[in-house]
Image (spheres, rainbow, N blue to C red):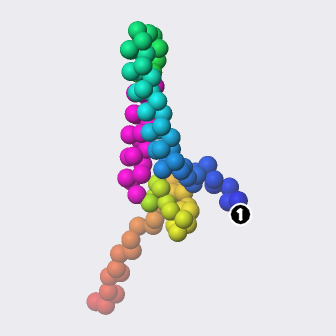
């Protein structure tokens, strides 16, 4: 069922992204080491940049996983409605009326 709010309530497969990030990190480290040993500083720098990018990505993924079920809900948690920023203001609280006897 489409609700029209999918981009707001979209979920990411964080654990899959984490393992893909680990895979990329391993290849970037291996490439950096291999190109340093082969004497190719340009390629080593490119692999080192990918290494940095994969590390930052992994850090953000782990941060989102640790933020709890609001950001990484399981199958048993239904989708949540987006927060409405256009809240209607509440009326001021009513003051008790004064007694009318003299």
- Where 4 sits versus 77, above or below? above
In this figure, which residue is indicated by the disc labeled 1?
1
What residue do we see at 54% from left, 49% from top? 12
In percent of width and height, residue 81 lies at 55, 61
Task: Using the image as rendered, state which of residue 86 and residue 31 is in the foreground.
Answer: 31
**Picture quadrant of residue 52:** top left
In percent of width and height, residue 34 lies at 42, 19
Task: Using the image as rendered, state which of residue 3 and residue 44 is in the foreground.
Answer: 44
Give the position of the N terminus as an image quadrant.
bottom right
**76 magenta-colored:** no
Task: Using the image as rendered, state which of residue 27 and residue 54 is in the foreground.
Answer: 27
**66 magenta-colored:** yes
In percent of width and height, residue 79 lies at 56, 62
Does residue 97 appear left or right of residue 73 in this picture? left
Segment tinted magenta in the rendering: 49-68
Does residue 41 appear left or right of residue 17 in this picture? left
What residue do we see at 47% from left, 14% from top? 43
Q: Residue furthest right?
A: 1
């Amino acid at each position: 069922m489409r609700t029209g709010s999918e981009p707001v309530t979209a979920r990411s497969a964080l654990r899959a992204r984490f393992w893909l990030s680990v895979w990329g990190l391993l290849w970037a480290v291996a490439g950096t080491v291999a190109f340093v040993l082969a004497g190719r500083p340009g390629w080593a720098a490119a692999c080192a940049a990918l290494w940095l990018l994969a590390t930052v990505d992994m850090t953000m993924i782990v941060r989102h996983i640790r933020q709890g079920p609001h950001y990484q809900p399981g199958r048993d948690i239904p989708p949540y409605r987006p927060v409405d920023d256009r809240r209607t203001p509440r009326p001021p609280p009513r003051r008790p009326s004064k007694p009318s006897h003299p």
